[in-house]
Amino acid sequence: MTTRDETEHLPAVVEPGGVPAVTQDGDRTPAVAEEAAQPAVAEEAGRPPADRRRRRTRRTALIVVVAIVVAAAAGLAATGAFSGDDGSTAQAAPDRPVATAKVQRMTLTSTETLDGTLGHGEPTAVTNGSASSASGQSGQGGNGRAADGGEFVTWVPGEGDTLGRGDAVYRVNEREVPLLYGSIPFYRTLEPGSEGADVRMLERNLAELGYDGFTVNDEYTSGTAEAVEEWQDDLNAEETGTVRPGDAVVAPGSRRVAELRTSPGAVAGGEVLTWTGTERIVSMDLDPQHEDLVREGSKATVRLPDGGTVVGEVTDIGTAGNDGGAGTGAGGESQGADEATLPVQLKIGDQKKLGRYQAASVDVILEADSRKDVLAVPVNALMARPGGGYALEVPAAGGSSDMVPVELGMFANGLVEVKGSGIKEGMDVGVPK
């Protein structure tokens, strides 16, 4: 049989939930503190050593268990387990949002970001046509041709060089073949009596180079012939007063040499070099589904590799294959209509903003849609409603907030168009912190 003295020093049994079980004498919590405060020297002196060891062991275990019980009781009190009710508590009314944003009235614009390439455009080839124009000619003469009629390339520019009006594109037997600005290549011999747009183009270039004695018009006169002779003398060419195909190279403006296709000492004839425009442009292959996003003259934002942006203007839009059908890929393979793309070029007005980039991959941001005078909020301000749809959390009086239903419109740049009763410009709405 267990004595009362032993019963008082048994560890308390803890019921589920952390509440001490009732001991045999009906007490809920053992009086450990009181016993611990009494001197135990005399009692211990009269007990055998084994009893004293068992007593100390039971006392230590009891102190540990009571500490656990007190901690559990404190946790239960914090959760309301000892509040005297059924253990549940009412949820506090929601506070104001920890962060807010303003409802803005603005023009909302959605965009499409596409891949583009910054460079100088597609190179075109320059062909030496002087060999054909000199066919049947013999003798050294003033134009520098060899006595046996053979012609050789004697000079070419360097890759990356920029050529302007009047500059030599290359030399054949030390005769300069210059660059003239225009859109009509020399396809016939021009001489006194000739008339046409090509005559006007030649006379305009001669005037820009400082030659005079003629009027810039469509008529090739004796005054024009005299100016041509003076020009030919400066080129170290035969002074004939006439201009033949191959005597000059025509391009829309200044050119940048991309790649050399011949070298000094080579027999004249064939491709001499390839070149591009001098200004950097942006090229892209546009999927036909985005064709309605571009038109000549429309603006686009170009994002550079360093994050900077410049404004580009669409200057040229090609076609997707033949009449929108199958085309030919870059490697010569056949492309289906669903693979065809539209070549698009954009001019960059402010070349300085391009920095030192000569060739780079860029993003082209095209405007897809635009809504004027709409109310917009950040997308993350939207709150899903239990029954479907969305609402905005609007701070209310008394430190609480109201959920105001809204209808959604266009999404763009992290914002969304919203409509709803009570939603006004400048209103604060809750957003996650």
Image (cartoon, rainbow, N blue to C red):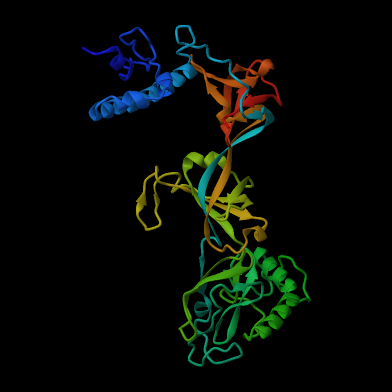
Q: Position of residue 115 (x, y in %)?
A: 50, 49
Q: Nearer the viewer, residue 190 or 391?
A: 391
Position of residue 6 in the picture relative to residue 313 (left or right):
left
409 is higher (above) or lower (below) than 335: above
Residue 186 appears anywhere in the view: no
Position of residue 183 in the picture relative to residue 116 (left or right):
right
Where's the C terminus, which quadrant? top right
Q: Nearer the viewer, residue 266 or 304?
A: 304
Where's the N terminus, which quadrant? top left
Q: Nearer the viewer, residue 158 or 334?
A: 158
149 is higher (above) or lower (below) than 24: below
Q: Position of residue 414 (x, y in %)?
A: 57, 35
Residue at 62% x, 64% y: name it.
252
Residue 70 appears anywhere in the view: yes
The image quadrant of residue 187 is: bottom right
Q: Position of residue 134 (x, y in %)?
A: 53, 81
Position of residue 49 in the picture relative to residue 359 (left or right):
left
What is the number of callouts on the image? 0
The image quadrant of residue 298 is: top right
Extreme residue in the left direction: 1
309 is higher (above) or lower (below) than 20: below
Q: Position of residue 304 (x, y in %)?
A: 57, 54
Q: Nearer the viewer, residue 28 or 412?
A: 28
Residue at 57% x, 55% y: name it.
306
Residue at 74% x, 72% y: name it.
207
